[in-house]
């Protein structure tokens, strides 16, 4: 792994639960978020570090809703 890589990892235990956390970090993070996350705030403004945005995770191919989500960009 190099400092130029973009990586993702599940940050919650593999178990039944109401909340799952996925961490994505690296230079392509915003590109990935823009493909899978739809939010009125993020669609109009560049994200502000350490702010929480509410929206929907979508299938990047057919644009169908998958689940509600909160995204924090740091």
Image (cartoon, helix red, strand yellow):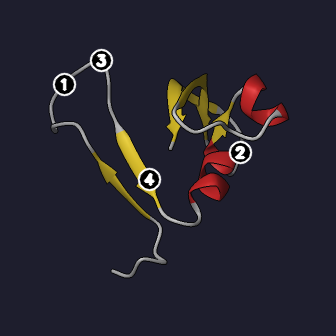
Give the class, few, some or many, for how many residues have Cα within 10 Å of label 1's Cα (few <14, many ≥20). few
Give residue 41's position: percent from left, percent from top: 75, 25
Q: Earlier in the sequence, mark 4 or mark 1?
A: 1
Of badges 2 and 1, the one in the foreground is 1
Q: Is residue 36 left or right of residue 43?
A: left
Whether 73 is drawn above or below 30: the answer is above
Give residue 14's position: percent from left, percent from top: 16, 38
* Occupied quadrant, residue 55: top right
Q: CA distance from mark 4 to mark 1?
A: 22 Å
Would you say the residues marked 1 and 3 are in contact, meaning their CB atoms lie under 8 Å apart?
Answer: no
Pick whichever, 67 or 28, lies toward us: 28
Q: Earlier in the sequence, mark 2 or mark 1?
A: 1
Q: Earlier in the sequence, mark 2 or mark 4?
A: 4
The residue that disc 2 covers is 62
The residue that disc 4 covers is 24
Residue shown at the point (60%, 25%) measured from the top left: 53
Which disc is residue 18 wearing? Answer: 3
**Label 4's element?**
strand
Would you say the residues marked 2 and 4 are in contact, meaning their CB atoms lie under 8 Å apart?
Answer: no
Q: Earlier in the sequence, mark 3 or mark 4?
A: 3
Q: Is residue 24 left or right of residue 54?
A: left
Q: CA distance from mark 1 to mark 3?
A: 7 Å
Would you say the residues marked 2 and 1 are in contact, meaning their CB atoms lie under 8 Å apart?
Answer: no
Q: CA distance from mark 3 to mark 4?
A: 20 Å
Of badges 2 and 3, the one in the foreground is 3
Of badges 3 and 4, the one in the foreground is 4
Give the class, few, some or many, for how many residues have Cα within 10 Å of label 4's Cα (few <14, many ≥20). some
Residue shown at the point (73%, 33%) measured from the top left: 42
The residue that disc 1 covers is 16
**Label 2's element?**
loop
């Amino acid at each position: 792994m190099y400092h130029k890589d973009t990586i993702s990892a599940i940050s919650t235990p593999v178990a039944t639960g109401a909340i799952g956390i996925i961490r994505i970090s690296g230079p392509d993070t915003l590109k990935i978020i823009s493909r899978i996350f739809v939010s009125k705030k993020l669609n109009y403004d560049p994200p502000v570090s350490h702010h929480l945005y509410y929206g929907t995770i979508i299938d990047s191919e057919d644009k169908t809703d998958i689940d509600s989500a909160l995204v924090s960009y740091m």
